[in-house]
Amino acid sequence: MRILICGSIAYDNIMVFPGRFREHILPEQIHILNVSFLVPELRREFGGCAGNIAYNLRLLGSDPLVMGTVGGRRFPAVS
């Protein structure tokens, strides 16, 4: 059965952080938590709400169909 997914199609910026956040958060200083982390790698993948839902449905064995708008200045590689 095909499932129609209507929604946004966008780029997802995925930051790769080696290790675990708990290695850098000090429990005794949680009241002054700084959430700035240096990431050595940044990936840009297709995603958006509809794109992410369709991707996961496909992993579950479904056959999704995505409907949304793409193109223009934000998607120069596609337009």
Image (cartoon, helix red, strand yellow):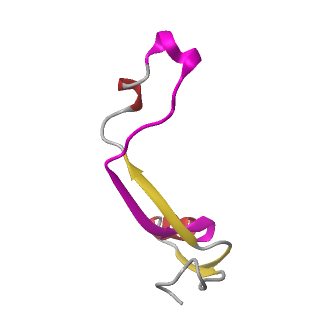
State the residue at coordinates (50%, 86%).
78
Residue drawn at 54 percent across, 80 percent down: 75
On the question of residue 34 being in view, the answer is yes
Q: Is residue 48 above or below residue 31?
A: below
* Quarter where residue 31 is shown: top right
Residue 1 seen in render? no
Q: Is residue 12 left or right of residue 69?
A: left
Residue 39 within the segment the image draws in magenta: yes
Residue at (48%, 9%) from the top-left corner? 28
8 or 63: which is nearer to us?
A: 8
The x and y percentages for residue 26 are 43, 16
Q: Nearer the viewer, residue 62 or 26?
A: 26
Looking at the image, the residue that sits furthest to the bottom is: 79
Q: 61 or 26: which is nearer to us?
A: 26
Q: Is residue 51 left or right of residue 42?
A: right
The answer to which of 13 and 47 lies nearer the viewer is 13
69 left or right, relative to 59: right
Which residue: 36% across, 45% down?
39
| Position of 19 relative to 14 (above/below) | above
* The magenta segment: 26-50
